[in-house]
Image (spheres, grey):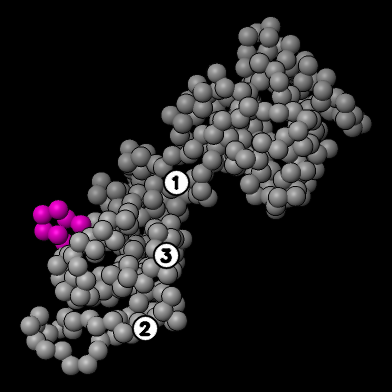
Amino acid sequence: MTRDNVISTLRDLLEALQALVLEGPEGMCKSTLLAQFARAYYSTTVSVFLSAANRLSLDPDLIRLDLTKQIHWILNSDVLVIPRYDPTALKLYHQELHGHARRHKLIYYFIVDGLEELGDAPRQALLQHLAELLPFGSRQFRFLFSGDLSYFKTLQTAPLDVKSYPMTQFSIEEAHVMFNDQGLTIDSIKDIRSLCGGIPGRMASILRSLKAGVPLAEIVDNMPATRPEFFDIEWKQVREDDHQTRRLLAVLVHDAKPHTLSLLAEILRLDPKTIEAQLRRLTFVAIDPDSQLIQLAPTGLRSFIALKPRGTLQNRPMRDTSKPANETESGQELLYLVGDRSGN
């Protein structure tokens, strides 16, 4: 799906800024967006798409040749035929493109994508080459990168004023457009967006499964096992050494009936205010202000946590919830803790 609003925003920002770097986690479709930008402004855009899987794409001489050919096409609308490789040709084409831009009052964009795929050493080496391959310093040229803003702080031969552009999640409206032809209700689309954290790449994965004929209910049911990365960001909020929070989650996950703060406090013999304070730190836990019912969101997170290995925590009494609250307990209950088998 083309994010026309983001593409327009980038172009507007580059009216005043020299360079932008698209930042965001994997799955935000930074490469896709840059490719869309290049297609939207094909007559004024020169692009370099790097790939760690293709070593030829990292060769500075081949990049230089490709840039030369692209600029020749922009200026002459035909394919450049080079009988013999000339490493000095690119600088001449930069000068010609700069003159053309000034005469016609145009802005030209240079895109570089794929730097974050590379290891530190090859990335640093290539960045220094890019300082020679790209025409930094001209008011007629703007630059779009993907990766991390810190990459460009190391440029030595051509310091560049680069600003960060954090990639945003898909909005509800964008999600609706993406799934518009799948016959889903708006609530189902909202659930998908919540499950995916609004990350476009994850939503595209769900869309591919739907187009393959897999029912949405089956996708959601299998997601904790088949797409555990969807829940990793939420789960990272729970520290491995935070045993008390893990106890709370263990009860919520492994005891199917609804829980209120007071019931959870009775089960774990903790103060309700302590439980509330701990749970409110977690973005995937919701507490109803009226009923005090505790819910896990998004859908599927309960199953994801339940799949985690359990450690056994002793020395902590827990009320047997199958008995009335006032019935005397016999012995000490073991609380299965979400974590590894050592109790972490």
Residue to which mark 3 is pinned: 239
Task: Give the amino acid at mark 1.
Answer: Pro
Counting from the top left corner in percent of width and height, residue 256 is at 22, 73
Q: How far is mark 2 from mark 1, CA to CA?
A: 38 Å
Location of residue 14 with respect to 117 vertically, above or below = above
Counting from the top left corner in percent of width and height, residue 94 is at 77, 20
Residue to which mark 2 is pinned: 312
Asked which secondary structure carries label 2, the reply is strand
Quarter of the image where one finds residue 337? bottom left
Q: Nearer the viewer, mark 2 or mark 1?
A: 2
Counting from the top left corner in percent of width and height, residue 86 is at 90, 29
Q: How far is mark 3 from mark 2, CA to CA?
A: 17 Å
Residue to which mark 1 is pinned: 200
Task: Give the amino acid at mark 3.
Answer: Arg
Q: Nearer the viewer, mark 3 or mark 1?
A: 3
Location of residue 233 with respect to 322 vertically, above or below = above
